[in-house]
Image (cartoon, rainbow, N blue to C red):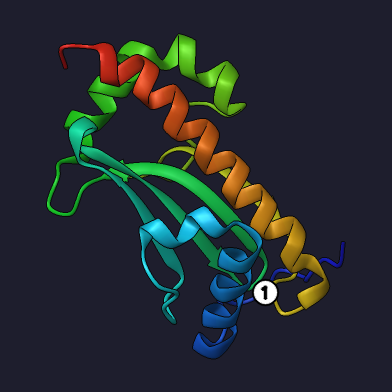
Amino acid sequence: MTMVKRGPYNDLKTDVIKRFWQHMIRRHREEIRHGLPQPVGARWHALPELDCCISLTTGIDFVRVFIRTMEGGKPVKLRERLERWSEELSPVFLVPLRSPGESDKFFSNKLDLDMNDESNWNEAADFLWETSQRYEDALEQTLGGAAA
């Protein structure tokens, strides 16, 4: 795994992002149900029945999965719902409900690697897919069964 040194904010170029999402969909074919690959740094796995979504994001030196509101939703309300289940969810997600400095991203799980290096793409795609599936399953079993 090749690492990139942190410096001033610098994101992946849009053509690299789109090629990475295409790679991920080829590797994990079920990902296509969440839409065609686009040249944007985030894909959402919408869970409208739970009033939240799982965000898969990529940057120049990381990939990340976190829970967020549906578009237009209130992060405070989602945080309150997730707090009720944090004792059950934190051990499954392997991260705390909130990370320092993040107020609208919950259970943020990040893998640091150089996304300009295509040799890292299998690891990145597997991390995003496996983590997002674990999140979906756990949310369905907790929030899905709760009168939230």
Q: Position of residue 37 (x, y in %)?
A: 45, 74
Instruction: Report whether 107 appears left or right of 26.
Output: left
The answer to whether residue 103 is visible is: no
Amino acid, disc 1? Gly
Q: Nearer the viewer, residue 146 or 104?
A: 146
Q: Quadrant of residue 59?
A: bottom right
**In the rendered view of the protein, which quadrant contains the N terminus?**
bottom right
Within 10 angstroms of label 1, few (less than 14), some, or many (20 or more) residues? few
Q: Position of residue 97 (x, y in %)?
A: 45, 27
Instruction: Report whether 79 appears left or right of 9.
Output: left
Provide the secondary structure element on which disc 1 rests. Answer: loop
Q: Quadrant of residue 13?
A: bottom right
Which residue lies at the image location 78% right of the left edge and 77% below the top edge?
A: 117
Q: Position of residue 101 (x, y in %)?
A: 44, 45
Instruction: Report whether 121 appears left or right of 131.
Output: right
The answer to whether residue 77 is visible is: yes
Which residue lies at the image location 70% right of the left edge and 69% below the top edge?
A: 6
Q: Which residue is mark 1?
A: 7
**In the rendered view of the protein, which quadrant contains the C terminus?**
top left
Which residue lies at the image location 86% right of the left edge and 67% below the top edge?
A: 2
Residue 34 vs 86, above or below: the answer is: below
Query: Given the current orientation, which residue lies at the most extreme front position?
Result: 29
Number of residue marks:
1
Q: Quadrant of residue 73?
A: top left
Q: Position of residue 121 (x, y in %)?
A: 72, 67
Which residue lies at the image location 59% right of the left edge and 17% below the top edge?
A: 91
